Amino acid sequence: MTESVKLTVPSDPKYLSLVREVVFHLLTGQEVAKAIIPRLVLCIDEACSNIIKYSYSECKDQPIEMCFLLANDIFEVNIRDFGKQCDSSDIKPRSIHEVKPGGLGTHFINEIMDEVEYCTNRDKGTLLTMRKNLKKEMASSRKEIG
């Protein structure tokens, strides 16, 4: 089944709960392992939080555009901002064992998603693309149950 959902929200943190609900609802209605859904929601929430903090410097009225595509057991997420571009070589997740607040969003994104790409070849902003093979996740969840 192929399903695509587009969502644009302002860069105000109060809209992150809406983003989480949309992703949760989209994935719950499909044949997706229940255990992976909260982790995928976390990745998207962390990516949007980073856009708000770093790309838009916490300005609350800038657009965050998202497209969620579910096709052939692949969940693809494209998140686009129009703010300060990131230098993808600077995006390095810190060790989970390094105890200090913040900075774990990219760690979780890289651990949970199968592919993570940052595209900055545009006038401004960044396009983040994340992919997860849900079929692989279904197989591993069946092993845990059986």
Image: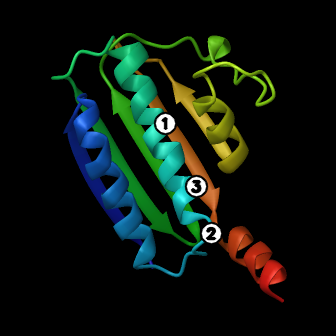
Q: Position of residue 137 (x, y in %)?
A: 70, 69
Mark closest to the chain's N terminus, 3 or 1: 3
Q: Quadrant of the C terminus?
A: bottom right
Residue 35: which disc? 2
Residue 39: which disc? 3
Q: Position of residue 56 (x, y in %)?
A: 31, 15
- Is residue 64 shown above or below 137? above
Q: Position of residue 22 (x, y in %)?
A: 31, 59
Mark closest to the chain's N terminus, 2 or 1: 2
Q: Let me know if residue 122 appears in the view.
A: no
Which corner quadrant of the image does residue 45 belong to?
top left
Q: Amino acid at mark 1?
A: Glu
> How many residues crowd mark 2 within 10 Å: few (<14), some (14–19), many (20+)?
few
Q: Amino acid at mark 2?
A: Ala
Pointer 3 and pointer 2: residues touching (CB < 8 Å)?
A: yes
Give the mark count. 3
Secondary structure under tag 2 reads loop
At 74% from the left edge and 76% from the top edge, which residue is drawn?
141
Q: Viewer-proximal residue, 134 or 18? A: 18
Q: Decide if residue 109 is on the left or right side of residue 76.
A: right
Q: Quadrant of the N terminus?
A: bottom left
Gap between marks 3 and 2, in whole Å? 8 Å
Q: Decide if residue 103 is on the left or right side of residue 138.
A: left
Q: Amino acid at mark 3?
A: Arg
At 73% from the left edge and 69% from the top edge, which residue is drawn?
136
> How many residues crowd mark 3 within 10 Å: few (<14), some (14–19), many (20+)?
some
Which residue in the structure is indicated by mark 1?
A: 46
Which corner quadrant of the image does residue 144 belong to?
bottom right
Secondary structure under tag 1 reads helix
